[in-house]
């Protein structure tokens, strides 16, 4: 994949068969239908849990806009969603009117794909682009000023954990006490050793080495690229340190050796108790609720990252492919979905932390009864406030996936950390070179 250089946009931050719909692949008659007052079918294709369907926002929008029908599909794994979307974008068919863009992909969109996406300044969403925190809009803006996405959420970090499992192992289960017991990641791993010695067979301290790695690098400003747009992932000591820490956890038997979003055992683990802790960007709150179900209510809790550090993992955008035949109606929809009122509603229900300034202010006092009334507004607001402004690059998603796969090989095949690291570096250079 080509990697033209550019100055990386800064940010602090985070289900597909893409929809094959008449509105998105040639069967509709364009925005002329809406202008004439005719019915319009809008395809929306996302990944993971954006919260819109869970909160009922699609139905609410349809009720407010007679004649508009929303056809929604979501793919659980973004690593499957994005390659499929690239194939459809290249062919000019099969895309939905609204597509989700993960934050690790937005620089690729801005750098390599601007002609495949709609400049939202030329749509009814033009007035919406200025209501987000500054870096969110900047990351989706091309050097010539085209805005290719509206921000949905950001991914401030916490640590989610099974309080009942920690209690059984004799570890502190109160959020404040647990936070005090982990001043840094080494202390977090030391707690894991204590847990391993006391926990029942089949229960690991953490879900995966890959998840742990992503949490640690989420605290860095410079990760895979420097400010000049150069790849520095293989020479950045912070990346190697995060990799080695996560690999150590995997080698030491502190992880459940489960691949996030891929291994069925990972989904089952939220309710079965196969792992006690998981790195928890705010959007993970809704995922845990969905997988742990009613039986997990009151068992799960959330606290800050070790040392109370800030970090950001994930977040997303909504964009409109050039192939959409209903750009104006799609723009109205995404402007409404990402408005402060809707962002606040989604956070209170499923945990996706807002990216608009007004919504962020409105959720600071939010608590979540599912997580034992944890002050999620306070926890994630402080994490967002303390998080660095990260530097993004066009191959962020590729590099992240390579690191996660390499760490999985440490956990499941016994690969040494050095060998796994070298494999990851080689794979990235082959793909990004």
Image (cartoon, helix red, strand yellow):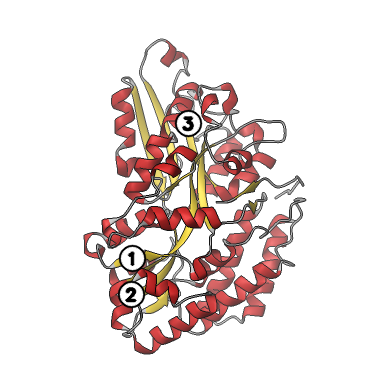
Which residue is the site of mark 3? Answer: 97
Residue 98 position within the rendered picture, expressed as x and y whole percent measured from the top left: 47, 34
- Quadrant of residue 234 within the rendered picture: bottom right
Extreme residue toward the top, this view: 36
Is 128 displayed left or right of 268 in the figure? right
Is 224 in front, or is 307? 307
Label 1 or label 3, whichever comes before in sequence order: 3
Residue on which the image places disc 1: 301
Q: Residue at x 35, y 64 (%)?
A: 267
Mark 1 vs 2, N-terminal side:
2
Q: Which of 284 and 340 is in front in this view?
A: 340
Residue at (62, 42) in percent of width and height: 139
Percent coordinates x, y for residue 116 in the rendering: 62, 33
Q: Which of marks 3 and 2 is nearer the N terminus?
A: 3
Q: Residue 38 carries which label?
A: none
- Where residue 402 appears, as percent x and y from the top left, is 61, 64
Residue 286, x across and y down, in percent: 35, 54
Task: Give the quadrant of residue 432.
Answer: bottom right
- Please state which of residues 41 and 161 is positioned toward the viewer in this rendering: 161
Tell me the SS state at disc 1: strand
Residue under the image location 65 percent in, 35 percent down: 114
Q: Does residue 2 show up?
A: yes
Visible residue check, residue 79? no
Mark nearest the camera among 3 and 2 is: 2
Q: Is residue 44 left or right of residue 244?
A: left
Which residue does the image show at 53% across and 72% down from the upper left? 408
Query: How many C-alpha atoms fall within 10 Å of the one at disc 3: few (<14), some, or many (≥20)?
Result: many
Q: Dot 2: what SS?
A: loop
Disc 3 is placed on an element classified as loop
Q: Mark 2 points at which residue?
A: 173
Q: Are marks 1 and 2 in contact (CB under 8 Å)?
A: yes
Mark whose residue sits in front, 1 or 3: 1
């Amino acid at each position: 994949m080509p990697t033209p250089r550019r100055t990386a946009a800064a940010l602090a931050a985070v289900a597909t068969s893409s929809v094959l719909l008449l509105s998105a692949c040639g069967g509709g008659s364009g925005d002329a239908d809406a202008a004439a007052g005719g019915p319009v079918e809008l395809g929306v294709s996302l990944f993971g849990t954006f919260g819109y369907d869970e909160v009922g926002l699609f139905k609410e929008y349809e009720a407010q806009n007679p004649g508009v029908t929303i056809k929604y599909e979501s793919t659980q794994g973004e690593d499957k969603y994005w390659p499929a979307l690239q194939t459809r974008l290249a062919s000019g068919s099969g895309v939905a009117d609204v597509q989700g863009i993960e934050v690790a992909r937005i620089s690729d969109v801005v750098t390599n794909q601007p002609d495949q996406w709609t400049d939202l300044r030329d749509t009814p969403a033009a007035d919406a682009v200025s209501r987000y925190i500054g870096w969110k809009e900047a990351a989706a803006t091309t050097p010539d000023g085209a805005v290719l996405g509206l921000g949905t959420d950001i991914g401030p970090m916490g640590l989610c954990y099974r309080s009942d499992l920690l209690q059984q192992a004799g570890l502190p289960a109160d959020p404040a006490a647990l936070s005090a017991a982990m001043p840094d990641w080494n202390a977090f791993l030391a707690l894991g050793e204590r847990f391993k010695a006391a926990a029942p067979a089949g229960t690991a301290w953490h879900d995966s080495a890959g998840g742990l790695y992503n949490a640690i690098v989420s605290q860095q400003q410079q990760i895979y690229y420097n400010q000049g747009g150069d790849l520095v992932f293989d020479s950045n000591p912070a990346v190697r340190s995060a990799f080695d820490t996560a690999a150590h956890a995997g080698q030491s038997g502190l992880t459940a050796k489960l691949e996030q979003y891929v291994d069925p055992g990972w989904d089952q683990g939220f309710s079965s108790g196969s792992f006690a802790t998981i790195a928890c960007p705010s959007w993970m709150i809704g995922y845990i609720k969905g997988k742990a179900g009613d039986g997990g209510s009151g068992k799960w809790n959330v606290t800050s990252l070790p040392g109370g550090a800030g970090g950001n993992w994930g977040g997303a955008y909504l964009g409109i492919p050039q192939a959409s035949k209903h750009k104006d109606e799609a723009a109205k929809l995404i402007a409404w979905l990402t408005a402060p009122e809707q962002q606040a509603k989604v956070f209170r229900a499923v945990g996706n932390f807002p990216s608009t300034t007004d919504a962020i202010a409105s959720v600071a006092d939010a608590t979540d009864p599912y997580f034992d009334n944890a002050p999620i507004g306070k926890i994630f607001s402080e994490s967002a406030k303390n998080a660095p402004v990260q530097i993004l690059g066009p191959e962020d998603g590729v590099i992240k996936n390579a690191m996660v796969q390499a760490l999985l090989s440490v956990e499941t095949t016994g690969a040494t950390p050095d060998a796994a690291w070298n494999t990851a570096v080689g794979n990235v250079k082959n793909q990004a070179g």
